[in-house]
Structures are given as structure tokens and as C-alpha cells.
Amino acid sequence: MDVSEFFLKLLLIIISAKFFAEVFIYLHLPSVLGEVIAGIIIGPSLLGFIEPDATFHLLAEIGILLLLFEVGLETDVGQIIKVGIQSTLVAITGVATPAAAGFWVSYHWFGLDMIPSLFIGGTMVATSIGITVRVLVDLKKRHTKVSQIVIGAAVMDDVIGVVVLAVLYDFAVKGTVSIADTARVMFFIAVFLVLAPIIAKLFVPTMAKLSSVSKTKGMIPALIVSLILGLAVISHKVGAPEILGSFAAGLALARRFFLPLGATIEHYSHEMAEKIE
């Protein structure tokens, strides 16, 4: 795929996504549902205009990292702690129900073997935090107690999903479950979730110092993106989803930083619009 073809496909994605988002908002439905419908229509499921490839997958990964960073910035840790029990119950239910249903349908309806059925059940565990947050925003429920419960549960679901798949992989390869390997994965994830916000907070004075001595514009956004990507890489290395790294970065900077990434982008967008006009 050459550059012009990529730009054309990206243009089609943006226009179709915004069009269907507007339609769904007009119908008093979450705009993210319209964007999903747009993807189904122009994707391989229907018209086949867009074939998902490594390039679009990479763009999607970058987008979800930035989205989860913004979610972290707007998340009240105190509120999440207060609803910890409710979030845990929701997370357990959200893990057990789809996992059991996925296994049962695969094993009993489609007649698959035990291992493939277990893996299908395991893959049903993960929650799309990005979709969840977008729906809450569209419904104007982002800062409610219910929202905090759902977001807390979604984060737990992703962590549990990683552990479940690690256990299933051990079982499929070795024919048994290694308690030590499972404990190691859980330990690394727990350590990361504890240390990541601390690392981000320690990085704040460095950002402030570099920003004060920098002679170029855009130092703060560049440093924030660097922090997001760095924590995402570390998160991946310890066996956790990359989005937990960006989410942790947002949590750490939420009450320590005055210029969220979204506000920066919005500021530059307004400046550009004024120049065009």
C-alpha cells in the first residue's frame, strides 16, 4: 500500500466514522456505536473498502493508548477505591460469565476440543475499556459513581484476562498449570501497577525543568507522550496490557499536572482554526 492509498483509506475511515457518529447522536444513541457500524460497513464484513493491516493496527494502538491516558487523567483514584468492592464484584461477574459462556458454546455447540474451547472462553474475558469509556462519555455518565465502578472493573478484567490466558497457555503446552509461573505474572503486574504511578510522579519535576529551559514549543506534549509510550513498553515487558501503562501515567499526572494532553491538542487545534479563518 503506497502513501496516497493509505491517505485515501484514512480519509474514508474518518469521514464514514464521523458521519455515522453524527447519525447515531441524532438518534440519541452513543456515537461510538455509529463508528463501530461504520467500520463494519466499510470493512471486510460488508463493502471491503478497508482491509485491516499492520499500519491501521498500529494507529489503533496509539489511539487507545492516548485515550486510556486521558481516562487516567480524569479518573478519581479516591472514588475508585471507595467503589472497590463493587468494581471487584462486577469484574468477577464480567470474567466468569463470558468465559463460561464462551467455553460452553464452543465445547457443546460447536464440538471443539477442550483446549480450544478453554482458549475461546479465555479470550472472552477481556473488556474493551476504550469502547466502555466512549459510551459513558456519550451518555454523559463519565464522572458518576457507576462510571467509576465500570472503569475499575474494566481495568481488573484486563489484568485477570492476562493471568487467565497465561494459565491456559501453560496448560496447553505443559499439560499442567504452573503455580509458580502464574504467581510470577501476577507479581510483575502488581509491582508494575504500584510503581508506574510513582515513576510518573517522579518524572513530573523533570518535565517541568525541561519545559522551563526548552527553547522550542511543544516540549510538554512531547514529554507526556514519551512517558505514555515508556510505561506502555514496560507494561508489555512485565506481561500486562500496554494500555495499563498509559492509564497509570494518566492516574499519576491527574492531580499533579496542569495541562492534560487533550487540552494541549485542543489549544493547538483552535490556534490552527483561527489562522485558517
Image (cartoon, grey):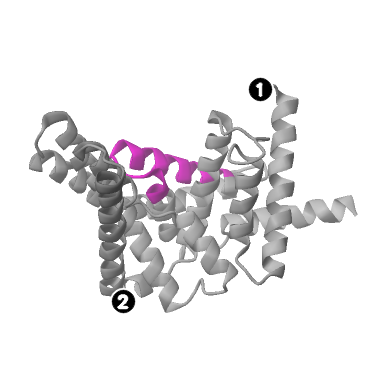
On screen, residue 104 versus residue 70, left or right, reads left
Could you say whether the residue bearing mark 2 is in a helix, strand or loop?
helix
Dividing the image into 4 quarters, which one contains the N terminus?
top right
Sequence-wise, the earlier of marks 2 and 1 is 1
Query: Residue lying farthest top?
Result: 2
Q: Which of marks 2 and 1 is in front?
A: 1
Magenta stretch in the rendered image: 222-245
Residue at left offset 75%, top offset 34%: 8
Regarding residue 276, the answer to whether it shows in the image is yes
Disc 2 residue type?
Answer: Lys
Q: Is residue 126 magenta?
A: no
x, y percentage for residue 79? Answer: 37, 74
Q: Residues within 10 Å of mark 2 (few under 14, many from 20)?
A: few
Q: What residue type is labelled 1?
A: Met
Q: How far apart are marks 2 and 1 (CA)?
A: 50 Å
List the residue tagged with mark 2. 82
For the C terminus, the quadrant is bottom right
Q: Is residue 275 above or below residue 84?
A: above
Q: Which of 52 and 225 is in front in this view?
A: 52
Q: In which quarter of the image is residue 88?
A: bottom left
- Residue at 35 percent across and 73 percent down: it is 78
Residue 118 locus on image (x, y percent) = 23, 43
Residue 60 x %, y % = 54, 42
Residue at (77, 57) in percent of width and height: 270
Relative to 41, is 138 above or below? Answer: below
Left of 135 or right of it: where is 240? left
Residue 194 visible here: no
- Disc assigned to residue 1: 1
Name the residue located 73 percent from the left edge and 33 percent from the top edge.
7
128 or 252: nearer the viewer: 128
